[in-house]
Image (cartoon, helix red, strand yellow):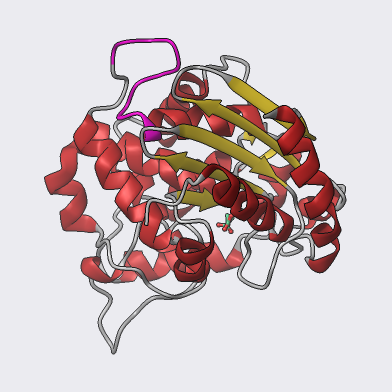
Amino acid sequence: MEELLEQLIDECKIYTKDGELANYIPELTKADPNMLGVYMISSDGKQYSAGDCMHQFTIQSIAKTILLLQALLDKGIEEISSKVGVEATGKPFDAINVSGQKLASKNLNPMVNMGAILMCTLIDGDTYDEKFERVLALTRELAGNPDIQIDEDVYQSEKKYGSKNRALAYLLKSYGMLEDDVEEVLDCYFKSCSISVTCKDLANIGFVLANRGQMPGRKERVIPVKYTRYVNAILMTCGMYDGSGEFALRVGVPAKSGVGGGIMAAVPTKMGIGIYSPTLDEKGNSVAGIRLLERISNQLYLSIF
Ligand code: GLU
């Protein structure tokens, strides 16, 4: 299997040239544009990797998955569904998703910024520092890696250049959908996006989602099945921003991308996959990452369709 992964990485390296590094957060432009790595953990516990799979990068929008999971664990499906919808927005991640004149909960999606910012308010904790600590603890638990930290430079950069996210949060506040202090809420969101991970960490998180809440080599469920189902369904329809439809055709598994260049994929009952390659297409998805995942999916018959 590792030979196959090495070969696919060699074939896909060329596509790293077809994308651009995210530049709206200046710190992200410091990434090495040539990198490409993959880590896979199959449901029988076997692990395979190739390329730059242990390089650290920021989780970015893949944190939306963790924010949603933590909010579900804390508040349950009924309350979360009353605050955000599940329909694909078909819009970019930072879109101001207002249909007509009215901003309504059902038009928000937890995989798009406004919905994800709102998730921060629904996580238990007396302060936003406490809420973030719980998000970080859940990330560490799902990734099976107690050493995960935030990348302080990316966090500061996000905070400094976060005007669009501030606009989105203030819009939520103006509609009475967010009560708390915008800066505090955003601090939890920015820190969550700045969590530093490797492909291996993402593969572990994907594994838990793929295996109905179970961790590799452990029997107990860390996440109840009803929540993994909920999250996987949203990942399938909205996890790759407004590129989710094409991704469903080409790869065909629930996945979430981030502008740091990561992709986390959860192949139901089969495996978790983490991919890294930081150059992005115009929708914010890793170009070489998707190509690699497409080839892996074809070779191993992973598409659920
Ligand atoms: N920190 C990013 C933002 O909200 C995450 C975006 C992404 O990965 O799509 O601006």
Indicate whether 82 appears above or below 208. Answer: below
Q: Position of residue 16 (x, y in %)?
A: 81, 58
Q: Position of residue 66 (x, y in %)?
A: 42, 38
- Give the magenta part as a residue range: 210-220
Assign the C terminus to one quadrant of the image.
bottom left
Magenta stretch containing residue 217, yes or no? yes
Instruction: Identify which residue is drawn at 60% across, 46% down.
Output: 299
Residue 220, picture quadrant: top left
Observer-nearest of 16 and 94: 16
Residue 43, picture quadrant: top left
Q: Position of residue 222 (x, y in %)?
A: 32, 20
Query: Is 66 left or right of 4, judged from the image as shown?
Result: left
Assign the N terminus to one quadrant of the image.
top right
Indicate whether 127 appears above or below 60. Answer: above
Q: How many marks?
A: 0
The answer to whether residue 94 shows anywhere in this view is no
Query: Is 80 left or right of 187, judged from the image as shown?
Result: left
Indicate whether 8 appears above or below 92. Answer: above
Observer-nearest of 257 and 153: 257
Ligand 1: image quarter = bottom right
Indicate whether 32 appears above or below 87. Answer: above
Q: Could you tell me what secondary structure mostly forms the magenta stretch?
A: loop
Query: Is 110 left or right of 295, judged from the image as shown?
Result: left
Instruction: Identify which residue is drawn at 49% across, 46% down.
Output: 301
Observer-nearest of 264 and 72: 264
